[in-house]
Image (cartoon, rainbow, N blue to C red):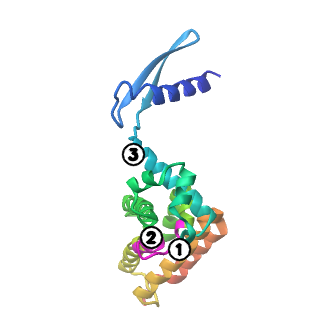
Amino acid sequence: LVKPIMKTLLEFFTIHYIKKKKYQNGQECYFNLKVGPKKVTLKKKVILMSKFQETDQTIQQAFFKVLAAEPFETITINKICSEAKISRTTFYRHYMDKYALLSKVNHAFSSALAAYLQRRIHQTNIADTLVLIAKYLSTNAKPISDLLRVHTPESDLSASFQKIFHAKFARYIDYELSKGAVTAFPVAYLIELYLAIAMVFLSYSLKKGLDVAVVQSLNDFQKQIFTEKSEN
């Protein structure tokens, strides 16, 4: 019983107390609370957002909800504002139009994916990499899955992901060939093949979750593409 009470108190102080004390974003704060006979020190890292940032996040979440219900082409500013419970004036303080909103969320997801892969630049198994990516993106599976179906001249998340994957797969193929692996396929063709498989796998996994059989098929495919160099 004590732990739920402590958690509730901690959230209360986070919301109602830290701003009064003017804590800065990322700063750690402490609260001394008496729970029964014990004096407990609670620790909380403060993540503060400005009112503008909070509203921006509300607009993006509203956009995701509307996009889950209908195609991007039919979405209007009024529908987003209605879902976010804001005025059109407030929306236009943040975005010029729905295409600007689409561009921002797509950029955020593609930048996050690029940074994630950069931290795993030494990962050389493509099947394992794709599984890790699917797990990483699963936190936002529904909005990403919906965004991957939206293709506009202004912004295209699928195209952005493919560009990121292209660089990753090119490095992987170079790595395999440098080890003496042999393949009967042209490198350019292999990259496009990996791209197609990656996007299908990612789209399926975001909708259905990871499937052991599908993951195994990736490993089998990888073995078929490259063979060890013959000593003869």
Mark 3: few/some/many CA within 10 Å (<14, 14-19, 20+): few
Decide if residue 155 is in sight here.
Answer: yes
Q: Label 2: few (<14), some or many (≥20) within 10 Å?
A: many
Magenta stretch encompasses residue 39 = no
Residue pointed to by mark 1 = 199
> Are the residues tagged 3 and 1 within 8 Å (C-beta)?
no
CA neighbours of label 1 inside 10 A, class few (<14), some (14 to 19), many (20+): some
Mark 3 to mark 2 CA distance (whole Å): 29 Å
Q: Nearer the viewer, mark 3 or mark 1?
A: 3
Circles 1 and 2, Cβ within 8 Å, touching? The answer is: yes
- Three-letter code for the amino acid on which mark 1 is drawn: Met
> At 56% from the left edge and 66% from the top edge, which residue is drawn?
146
- The residue tagged 2 is 161
The secondary structure type at the circle numbered 1 is: helix
* Image spot of residue 131 (x, y percent): 54, 64
Q: At label 3, which amino acid type do we have?
A: Phe
Q: Position of residue 112 (x, y in %)?
A: 41, 59
What's the magenta region? 147-163
Query: Which residue corresponds to the image point at 52% horizontal and 73% vertical from the top-left?
Result: 198
